[in-house]
Image (spheres, helix red, strand yellow):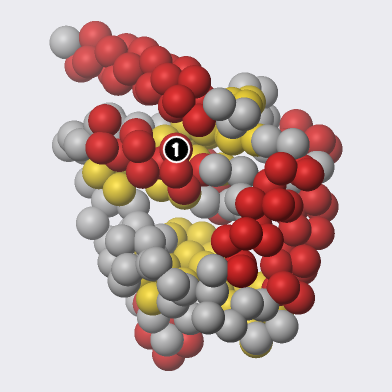
Amino acid sequence: MGKIFCFIGKSASGKDSVFKALSKEFPEILEIVPYTTRPIRKGEMDGISYHFVTNEIYHQMLSQNQIIEARSYNTKQGIWTYFTAVTNIDLEHHNYMTINTLIGYQSLKKYYGDDIVIPIYIEIEDEIRLQRAINRERSEKKPKFDELCRRFLKDQKDFNEENLQAANITKRYRNYDLLDCIHKISSDIHTYLDKTKQYQK
């Protein structure tokens, strides 16, 4: 049975950069591209960053029992929903990577099991990630700093120590040095894959 490596972290923690680098290093591990009803942002590509869908499509997939987990946020621009669907996930033949929230990770773990879903929690000092978020938002045609502040404060609450312990997140990957962080995660993924191969033999 394959594994799902679930990348988790606060906004602007660098998890997207780490994820992209490891996706190139492990091309045999397929990506679970999440879905969202929010508008596409500069630099994002439909089907790569997310599957960008309408609220109507979300409710249609929900009625067809295609959704594993979903989270909705009441943002300054309206209600945005992020979700993971069962479409094209074949753990009998493949391993997967995905980026998700802490609640999303717990939902995946509940659906597939603790031994299948592996958390990759990436963290960095809040001052650094706030500056990163501000710089990223400045690059947008119409910066939404109010939404940035909402996300930042919500992450402080969602990723508090109590919630991390409740989700059984015991290992942290510090992203002060991007290449070092990537190397440590890569080493652990290799270990998981080697164990899976030995078990299959």
Q: Is residue 164 left or right of residue 84?
A: right
Which quadrant of the rendered structure holds the C terminus?
A: top left
Examine the rendered structure and indicate whether residue 189 appears above or below residue 32: above
The outermost residue toward the bottom is 56
Residue 102 percent coordinates (x, y): 63, 47
- In this rendered view, identify the residue nearer to me: 6 or 21: 21
Residue appearing at x 26%, y 30% in the figure: 25
Count of numbered circles on the image: 1
Residue appearing at x 61%, y 69% in the figure: 138
Q: Quadrant of residue 168?
A: top right
Q: Which residue is mark 1?
A: 18
Q: Is residue 171 left or right of residue 67?
A: right
Residue 43 percent coordinates (x, y): 39, 67
Examine the rendered structure and indicate whether residue 140 appears above or below residue 55: above
Q: Is residue 114 visible?
A: no
Residue 100 percent coordinates (x, y): 52, 51
What kind of residue is marked 1?
Val
Which quadrant of the rendered structure holds the N terminus?
A: top left
Q: Quadrant of residue 133?
A: bottom right
- Element type at mark 1: helix
Residue appearing at x 54%, y 69% in the figure: 139
Q: Is residue 88 visible?
A: yes
Q: Is residue 41 left or right of residue 29?
A: right
Residue appearing at x 81%, y 35% in the figure: 161
Residue 178 percent coordinates (x, y): 50, 30
Q: Residues within 10 Å of mark 1 (few under 14, many from 20)?
A: many
